[in-house]
Amino acid sequence: MSDVSDLVAGDRAAVVAALTAAVDAGDDILLVAHVNPDGDSLGSALALALALRTLGGRPRVSFDAEPFAVPRTLHFLAGQELLVDPVTITTRPGLVVCLDTASRSRLGRLVRITGGSMVIVVDHHASNTRFGDLNLVDSEAASTSAMVVDLIDALGVELDADLAAAIYTGLVTDTGSFRFAATTPAVHRLAARLLATGIRHDLISRALWDTHRFGYLKLLGEVLGRARLEPEHDLAWTWCTQADLRNAGLDYDEIEGFIDTLRTASEAEIALICKQEGDVWKVSVRSRGSVDVGALCAGLGGGGHRLAAGFVTSAELAELMEAVRAALVRAPRLPDPVGGALTGPDAAAGRTPAPAPVQGQVQDQGWADRGSAVSVR
């Protein structure tokens, strides 16, 4: 194994020891997903919380969202009885575990509880700032949930359907249903193991991607209808305002999938959508493989993966797009994805680079009503 793998293994052992000590001591353990969590962040937090509860621990799960509600598409995940609204957390837990969270700012209002508590960070973003007391960060991992399953194994907890559904949700979210370059032989082996627990992967996929209110279809047409193609910047972009959402009767979390349709435009390397929320624009950016949009967004105050990233700004729409165009000129270029081999080694075995990416990654899915048995047999 490489030095990187050895370091990750050492960090994993330290995290397992800290989790075990917290359970044995009866400490309150708070697992935190990032602001407005996606399937990987919330799935990872709930899976680890359920495992710790099995061991006799005292876990709770929280995240910052206004209003505090599980996104619509993640309604089926088990363990939601462990969720607590940030405003109700009045005492500092003994241990805080941050899942899929690259920086303190991604904790939102929950950043206040990190002072005075031991903080563990478990994440797969290369941009992670390592803000914890213990940091388990593996940028080669396909998802944070794929790292969490290793922790669960090390804790000695057997995977059941509820755990598997949460982990699988993170895995398919961050690999784009196994379409993105993060998908390796190890990813498929993990998926097979999860499916062997009896989860209904077809129902999970339907909940994540194939269930929308009719207003979604109408608004998608409007937002795509105003999309602009700028060949000189290799860019396709569009925007959605709060008025658009209000008129369509939709919630903000319901439009996270719009970027996935926009990014299919073959004439543009970069896809970008500006989504208005309150006084800010939340900007999602995707790359087809030749531009590092993680670095691009980091320069604009955000961050993320090389092929999927974002940032938030209070600038006017025209001003923010001018900033994006200027940043695109400076954005690092990645190796030509077309020139790469169509087959490649397993990134998890020796950390040999996976085949060059063709498409980017997707983040931030959403759905809200509490559902039933997608996670079970």
Image: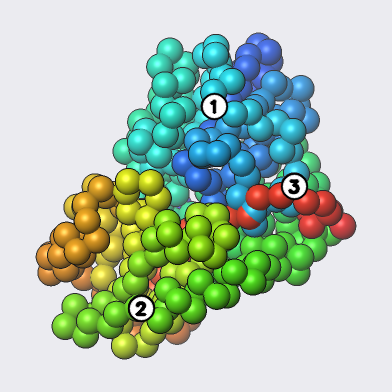
> Would residue 255 be visible to someone looking at this image?
no
* Circle 3 residue: 370
Q: In the image, what residue occupies the spot 43% across and 34% down?
A: 107
Neighbours of disc 2 within 10 Å: few (<14), some (14-19), many (20+): few
* First in residue order: circle 3 vs circle 1: 1
**Separation (CA) of disc 2 from disc 1:** 38 Å
- The mark lying in front, picked from 2 and 1, is 2
**Separation (CA) of disc 3 from disc 1:** 19 Å
* Circle 2 residue: 226
Looking at the rendered structure, the kind of residue marked 3 is Arg
Residue 308's place in the image compared with 373, above or below, is below
Mark 3: secondary structure:
loop
Badge 3 vs badge 2, beta-carbon distance below 8 Å: no
Comparing 63 with 347, the one in front is 63
Mark 2: secondary structure:
loop
Residue 111 position in % (x across, y down): 41, 27
Q: Work out which quarter of the rendered image holds the C terminus and state it.
A: bottom right
Residue 333's place in the image compared with 47, above or below, is below
> Would residue 213 be visible to someone looking at this image?
yes
Looking at the rendered structure, the kind of residue marked 1 is Pro
* Circle 1 residue: 86
Comparing 320 with 373, the one in front is 320
